[in-house]
Amino acid sequence: MNILVTGSNGQLGSELQELSRSISDHSFFFYDLPELDITDSEAVMSAVAECRPSVIINAAAYTAVDKAERDPESAFRVNRNGAGVLAAACRDAGALLLHVSTDYVFDGSQPRPYRESDPPSPSSVYGRSKFQGEGLIGEIDPSHIIVRTSWLYSSHGSNFVKTMLRLGAEKKELQVVFDQTGTPTSAVDLAGALMEIAWRHDPSHHYRQTYHYSNEGTASWYDFAYAVMELSGLECSVHPVDSSSYPQEAPRPSYSVLDKGAIKRDWGIRIPYWRHSLATMLSHQP
Ligand SMILES: NC(=O)c1ccc[n+]([C@@H]2O[C@H](COP(=O)([O-])OP(=O)(O)OC[C@H]3O[C@@H](n4cnc5c(N)ncnc54)[C@H](OP(=O)(O)O)[C@@H]3O)[C@@H](O)[C@H]2O)c1
């Protein structure tokens, strides 16, 4: 099977690249900017003609959540239009589009983990751009599987864990918000789940599916920061504060835990607990 990955130098894309090195029975084609811009339909069509993929995994996205509030045009161009370009290319090539979306499509007002059937109501530009990307994929209707994830981190790129490691080494004390609850997700684990779906999907079936995938368990950003310090042995005290003490440009859902029942049931995917995956990542940090 030929698998084309876009956004391959990002957190998730880098983990997909690492994972592919241990897989010999499929061929992988990794692209990122500037070589392949997912909003450029001619470039996407020629990459597809060259690679003849059975699956395109879209790990490309505009992910600067706060900056998106000031630059909605860029967020919508990549997260909506780019998703649409890939959807059209997959439809024309008869390939499966495995697209990644976000917990920020929800506004966080629900008191229980979000299921795929719960109506999205994004409160940020980023969340709206990702939700419209999902919608455009549905309209163009290639065979598609959308996987929403949350609070992604990896040893590649910038993310909350790496910021905490840097601050924890520089400071004795740190304030972190406790009133936003979600689930940290290891990009290694998400990459593994996407690969499983890619190579186990039935090419004769037209998929129109959305799934939720994060690590197991729940945490606040405070819990997450505390665990980073604890597991990495940094002597930095973490103090809980509420979000009004830490204003950000983009509103975040106060609760965005995802229900993973469907992906576990349909694909038999086993999901590690968030602290376990965090400990694994930290044990490999230099
Ligand atoms: N990060 C999170 O906490 C989080 C949470 C929930 C869901 N997600 C979703 O998970 C997926 C992977 O996220 P990630 O954290 O791995 O993102 P990331 O690290 O920001 O990587 C995204 C990659 O896409 C590239 N890219 C941007 N615009 C592009 C374009 N027009 N054409 C081709 N490539 C382009 C970026 O290049 P540049 O760096 O040069 O821009 C980058 O290499 C995304 O769909 C994201 O929305 C992320």
Image: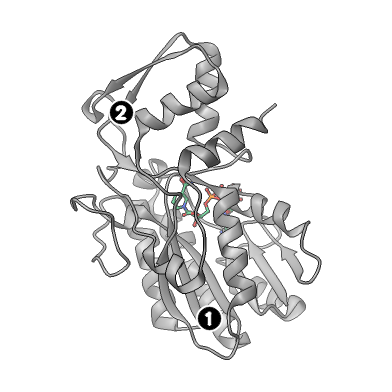
| Number of the label disc, if any, that sits on residue 284 | none
Q: Earlier in the sequence, mark 1 or mark 2?
A: 1
Q: Tell me the residue at 58%/91% (across/down).
A: 204
- The residue lying furthest to the right in this view is 24
* Left or right, 38 with reference to 224: right
Q: Is residue 156 shown above or below 142?
A: above
* Left or right, 20 with reference to 278: right
**Three-letter code for the amino acid on which mark 1 is drawn:** Ala
The foreground one among 188 and 75 is: 188
Q: Tell me the residue at 51%/83% (across/down).
A: 143
Residue 48 figure quarter: bottom right
| Number of the label disc, if any, that sits on residue 88 | 1
Q: Which residue is mark 2?
A: 177
The foreground one among 137 and 221 is: 221
Query: How far from the left and from the top, in percent, is residue 192?
Result: 61, 58
**Three-letter code for the amino acid on which mark 2 is drawn:** Val
Between disc 1 and disc 2, the foreground one is 2
Q: Is residue 166 shown above or below 116?
A: above
Q: Callout 2: helix, strand or loop?
A: strand
Q: Quadrant of the N terminus?
A: bottom right
Q: Within 10 Å of the Cα at label 2, are there few (<14), some (14-19), or many (20+) other Cα atoms? A: many
- The residue lying furthest to the top in this view is 172
* Left or right, 278 with reference to 178: right
- The residue lying furthest to the bottom in this view is 204
Q: Within 10 Å of the Cα at label 1, are there few (<14), some (14-19), or many (20+) other Cα atoms? A: many
Q: Tell me the residue at 42%/32% (across/down).
A: 224
